[in-house]
Image (spheres, helix red, strand yellow):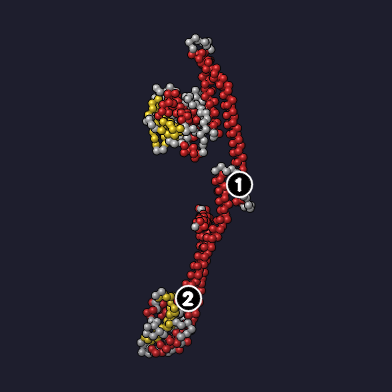
Amino acid sequence: MTDTQGGLRGWTAGRKGSLSRLRFTSLRLRLVVVFGLVALTAAVSASGIAYWLNREAVLTRAQDAVLRDFQQEMQNRAGALPVHPSQDELQHAAGQMAGSSQRFSVLLVAQDPSGKTVYGNSGGINGFALEDVPRSLRAAVNKRQKVTDANRSPYHLYWQRIDEHGTPYLVAGTRLIGGGPTGYMAKSLEPEAKDLNSLAWSLGIATGLALIGSALLAQAAATTVLKPVQRLGVAARSLGEGKLDTRLRVTGTDELADLSRTFNNAAEALEKRVADMAARDDASRRFVADMSHELRTPLTAITAVTEVLEEELESEAGGIDPMVEPAVRLVVSETRRLNDLVENLMEVTRFDAGTARLVLDDVDIADQITACIDARAWLDAVELDAERGTHARLDPRRLDVILANLIGNALKHGGSPVRVSVRIDGEDLVIAVRDHGPGIPEDVLPHVFDRFYKASASRPRSEGSGLGLSIALENAHIHGGEITAANSPDGGAVFTLRLPRDASQLTEENGEGTKNDEIGNSGKEGS
């Protein structure tokens, strides 16, 4: 049973392979059609010309032989009759004439001595009759022509081809010069018609064979010509999929070989360029990561000092000279801003290096948003529209970063109150953050998630680092979600976060672990 199934699978696979090889692409189909049309036109033209030439030759040869024999019999047999023969004499002469080598039917018409019209028919009473002769032919035979130097005879031999019940006939007639009977002849051309039908069938079969041969030839030519093009297409797709070491085997010196050689050169240059860019990108990421890491040590010490200074500023003893107080406050705020920037840079390098991981947990969305707002003292400025008991399996720390950045951005650049609404859309969790500010300019909308993007060139410095929204977007992406920005028809900007309710499926598909890492801006105001 197993051998039978294996053989069946092998036969099916072989048949599928054959069908795939026989499948016509558009270019292949055009080649086959063009070859077929050319071959069909040539074959039909040649067959038509050959048939017409052979038809004329066969009919002319048979016709000339019959007319020559009839004319000879008229001169010998009918010419021997008296000017006014009797019925019996006409009948006997017609029978003798019909017995010639051509075997045609004969009808003789004359007047007997009493002036009565008599007929002599080689086929008896039911044989060839005068009614079987076309009227136009009878009129031409009986018409006396004017005798001139160019026309020495008053009567001539006339013939006509007719079709009687599907059978072709040659009908001819003439009169004896100097008086005597008028003779008509009918000869069946059925043998010649059969020969011509056989010839037509032969030419038709030859045309069909030529068409089939041309199709096979076109298929072979198309395969030969298009195989390098197909290989080029496969190589181009591989190159587009990121396999930059893809190369074509170059054979020959024709145009297709030049095309393959050009492709190889382009692929080699692209691979070198991408390798150089990747090396520069890795070096840049390492530089940012190393710089951020190196800055953390002095920043830790500076932060400790600024915290002491901040406590001195807030103490009632007034330990700071009023003249120095503005400078101290500036140092404290800028140190905090620099610390946030370093943390954000380190988080960005984790995303760029692909080392960011999810730590999933079952999260009550309403509780998570409330905790985020409460930790930053935003309860008075934020309205929450979320039902308790809405759960999702997400990374709570990264969700906190996303919410902090979206809500903080709305409070800072929009207008109060900021409204956060939660809804379930199928298998997705949708969180919308809307403010009541002037909205986002249309030319800024495409760039709100760009790193270090400033909406106004006249305000190059701000309290934020310019990385908050981009980090929020990356955290949404690592969950398999998305963030979109738009302007509400009622005024204000709306940021919509869409996340899958169960991100564990995504981590299983991507093979991500559950190792925890540091999360920038966790527990800090969005920037």
Which residue does the image show at 49% across and 24% down from the upper left?
A: 464
Depth check: 184 or 425 in front? 425
Label 1, label 2: how many angstroms apart (C-alpha)?
67 Å
**Residue situated furthest top in the rendering:** 317
Depth check: 275 or 378 in front? 378
Depth check: 248 or 41 in front? 248
Query: Against 304, is 26 above or below?
Result: below
Query: Against 50, is 97 above or below?
Result: below
| One can see residue 187 in this view | yes
Residue 496 sits in which quadrant?
A: top left
Q: Is residue 450 left or right of residue 415?
A: right
Residue underneath mark 2: 192
**Residue situated furthest front in the rendering:** 1
Sequence-wise, which precedes: disc 1 or disc 2? 2
Secondary-structure class at tag 2:
helix
Depth check: 167 or 116 in front? 167
- The percent position of residue 316, horizontal first and vertical second, equals 48, 10
Which residue does the image show at 41% across and 26% down from the upper left?
A: 370
- The percent position of residue 264, horizontal first and vertical second, equals 61, 46
Question: Which amino acid, by three-letter code, is at mark 2?
Answer: Glu
Query: Against 401, is 246 above or below?
Result: below
Question: Which amino acid, by three-letter code, is at mark 1?
Answer: Arg
Which residue does the image show at 49% across and 23% down from the upper left?
A: 463
> Which mark, residue 344?
none
- The percent position of residue 262, horizontal first and vertical second, equals 61, 46
Q: Nearer the viewer, mark 1 or mark 2?
A: 1
Q: Is residue 323 left or right of residue 432?
A: right
Residue underneath mark 1: 247
Q: Residues within 10 Å of mark 1 (few under 14, many from 20)?
A: many
